[in-house]
Image: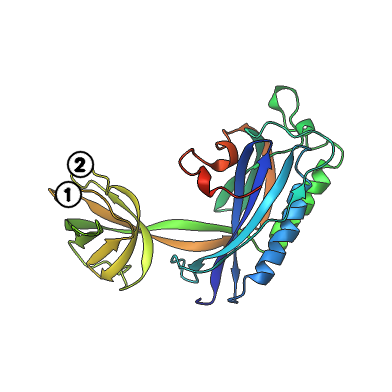
Amino acid sequence: MPVPSIVKATLFFQTNSFGWTESFFWQILSNDLTPQMASLQVIAQKRAALLGAQSFVKAERVSFEFDGDGLPVTGDSFLQYNRYNGATVPQADDPDTGVLVTQRNLVAARRRNMFLRGIWDDVNGAGGFYLPTIAGWQSAFNNWAAGLLAREAGWMSRDQLNIVGITNYTVDPLTGFVQVTLAAAAPQLVAGKTQEVRIRGVNVTSPLNGMQLIRAIDSTHFWLEKPLALIDYQFGGEVIFYGQHFEIARTIDAQKIVTRRAGAPLLQSRGRRRGKARA
């Protein structure tokens, strides 16, 4: 693994039959995920204090996601099933309801919102008003936020760099992998490197349009990292390249109660439930 590297830390939650995840990032100068898992478990215990009686942390995972330049990397992940239960009382609120939390960087120029689900039912007051004055809640929230700030957790921020036109693509008839040719050299394309780009305007409508993970061949050609069934190239299209950098959260504040639909039970569609995390 290159150093420094960006680690993605993910907590898996469950309230009754519903599940969701919460993720954040931090930077390390190590190839060892073991101490990162230890750090995540400390944060998991602090987060569990904000869960109601029917909610719990189900599992924890840390994984290498980006190198120091913000480019995706293929690396190890470390998953453990350590259960951290929510409070005995009060009861847990509906998993579709949560507290909107805003993280801001040092100069408050960039921010990231996240949603705390499985919260105490008591902090969701009449009319959906946020009641942080409920005994014990604010101190538990501050303890959790302080844990994230001390670990210098944050998020990956994306900036648009440049746009390059597409002149053609070909599909390997055996594998279905797509090779794209650009009208001009893109400095972001370095042979063998993977990155996420946005493709738009190819053949007006095409499965190729949208966010795609690519691997560079040279400065004017790249492969898609997945096969696609495409008709022959007709016209148009351009690739938008992005740069990513890591933002450290310097403040974490609770804003209000919000409603946002939780995922299907255990975050699995019917076609994916064979791969769900075990109980």
Q: Is residue 106 visible?
A: no
Counting from the top left corner in percent of width and height, residue 171 is at: 19, 57
Q: CA distance from mark 1 to mark 2?
A: 7 Å
- Assess disc 2: are there few (<14), some (14-19) or many (≥20) residues with their C-alpha within 10 Å of its C-alpha: few
Give the quadrant of residue 265.
Answer: top right
At label 2, the amino acid type is: Val
Horizontal arrangement in the rendering, residue 72 relative to residue 22 (left or right)? left
Query: What residue is drawn where x is 71% and y is 64%?
Result: 39
Using the image, tell me which numbered label, if any, was put on residue 63.
Answer: none
Query: What residue is drawn where x is 26% and y is 70%?
Result: 217
Residue that badge 1 annotates = 236
Horizontal arrangement in the rendering, residue 236 relative to residue 4 (left or right)? left
Q: Nearer the viewer, residue 16 or 222?
A: 16
Q: Residue furthest top?
A: 127
Q: Residue furthest right?
A: 135
* Label 1 SS: loop
At label 1, the amino acid type is: Gly
Counting from the top left corner in percent of width and height, residue 75 is at: 50, 69
Give the quadrant of residue 181.
Answer: bottom left
Using the image, tell me which numbered label, if any, was put on residue 204.
Answer: 2
Colour mapping used in the image: rainbow
Label 1 with label 2: CB-CB less than 8 Å: yes
Q: Nearer the viewer, residue 232 or 107?
A: 232
Counting from the top left corner in percent of width and height, residue 147 is at: 74, 58
Query: What residue is drawn where x is 84% and y is 36%?
Result: 89
Counting from the top left corner in percent of width and height, residue 94 is at: 68, 31
Q: Is residue 48 visible?
A: yes
